[in-house]
Amino acid sequence: MESKEFPAVETGAVVVLRLYDVANAIDLSEVERLASAQDGTSATRVHLARVEPKAIAYSVPPVGLSLGLVRVPLADGREVAGNATARLYEFGAITIAIRFPVQNTEWPDFVALSRAVNAALQGNGQGLWAELMERARRVAGPALERPAISGIEEDYLVTTVQRFDRRMTGEELLNTVDIALLLAGESKPLSEQARREYLRHVFTYNRDDLVALSWDHAFVWDPAGESDVADVLEVANAQLLELRYYDELLDAELPRIYDQVEASRGGLASLSRRRFSRLARTIYSRVAEVTEIVERVDNALIVTEDVYLARIYGAALELFRVRTWANGVERKLELMRDTYRALYDEAATARAEILEAAIVVLIVLEIVLAFLGWLG
């Protein structure tokens, strides 16, 4: 990277996200109704700003809630203020975001602020996250279907710039500042190999914009000031969150199912058959439920024509290994389907055997009665 005078950030922000799985589903229309019934609370449907709905859109637009102003103390004794919001997805995820605006800040200070804010919220910020989640639940609680805190969370940091103090291209920006160091959250210079790894996913659309992605941090320079890129990255994180949850759920479910299958094979044959049928119905219901929710998660964002956002979204899915998690969930669902089919076949075979035995008994009984009648 060439050594040049750093630009200053005239307008930008540091946005810290934390995502939670809170329910089996969320009735978003009910959230809007509940919010409208409370003084000072508003709910809005979220839509991507700069693209046509037919090009890329939410399958079901999430609902956004304002959670008010928060203050976060930093390690150096400073305190920064940010605006907190919640975004609720119909498949049961809630994103809490805190946006810290930045103005007229030199690039090294901007990088340091991003690092300091993230460290503060990852370290001593647990109480603040819990408080913000409680604010969201106070509004939306009745709209949560089968609410439960799974304990699975995702964090993501988005550092954004709308305007620098000078005109430049995306390529010039890469040659002027160390985007890789920003993404890594490190204060010491990175090796060339590490820099190349962090800059594997860099995108530009116009000459004067740039997006760079990593596993847990994104840099977005967008002079238009729109949030579409950040919104798409949030959806990818929400999909990862839900797939991790259902992967863990199925990990716990499969051993229990196998134990129940073994238990069903004990006892009297008639009891075992009833157990087989009951267990098969239980497995079928679970598979149908999880399959439906996973499909909703997978189709959270519909991309058709917007090549730029589609590339960013695809890169995020790759970085977050969303497809790998989805394949893992599908394999476990297939194991459950195989178990269901085996139980169903076993119960059907047992019913056929009982029917055959009953027919034999009836024939024998008819012969005995005929014989007794002959003797009489």
Image (tube, grey):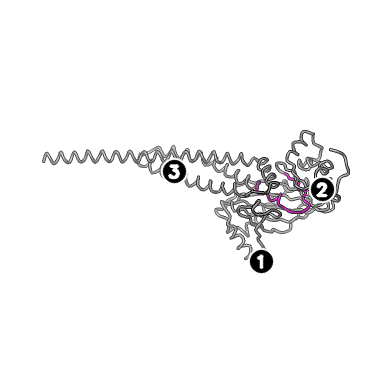
Location of residue 16 in the rendering, given as x and y in whole percent from the top left corner = 72, 49
Q: Quadrant of the N terminus?
A: top right
- Between the residue at mark 1 and the residue at mark 2, the CA separation in whole angstroms equals 37 Å
Q: Which residue is mark 3?
A: 280
Residue 15 is left or right of residue 265, and the answer is right
What's the CA distance linking mark 3 and mark 1? 49 Å
Residue 131 visible in image: no
User: Disc 3 or disc 1, which is closer to the eye?
Assistant: 3
What's the residue at 26%, 38% (across, down)? Answer: 360
Residue receiving disc 2: 110
The answer to if 226 sits in the magenta stretch is: yes
Question: Tag 2: residue type?
Answer: Phe
Q: Name the residue nearer the viewer: 19 or 161.
A: 161
- The reply to whether dot 3 and dot 2 touch (C-beta < 8 Å) is no
Q: Which residue is mark 1?
A: 39
Which span is picked out in magenta?
217-237
Examine the rendered structure and indicate whether residue 292 appears above or below residue 3: below
- Is 44 left or right of 246, judged from the image as shown? right
Residue at screen point 79% across, 52% down: 223
Residue 113 drawn at (x, y percent): 80, 48
Q: Secondary structure at mark 3?
A: helix
The amino acid type of the residue labelled 1 equals: Asp
Can residue 89 be seen from the camera position used here? yes
State the quadrant of the C terminus: top left
* Mark 2 surroundings: few (<14), some (14-19) or many (≥20) residues within 10 A: many
User: Is residue 130 shown above or below 190?
Assistant: below
Q: What is the secondary structure assignment of the residue under circle 1?
A: loop
Describe the element under mark 2 as helix, strand or loop. Answer: helix
Q: Between disc 1 and disc 2, whose residue precedes?
A: 1
Inter-mark Cα distance, 3 to 2:
58 Å
Which numbered disc, 3 or 1, marks the residue that appears first in the sequence? 1
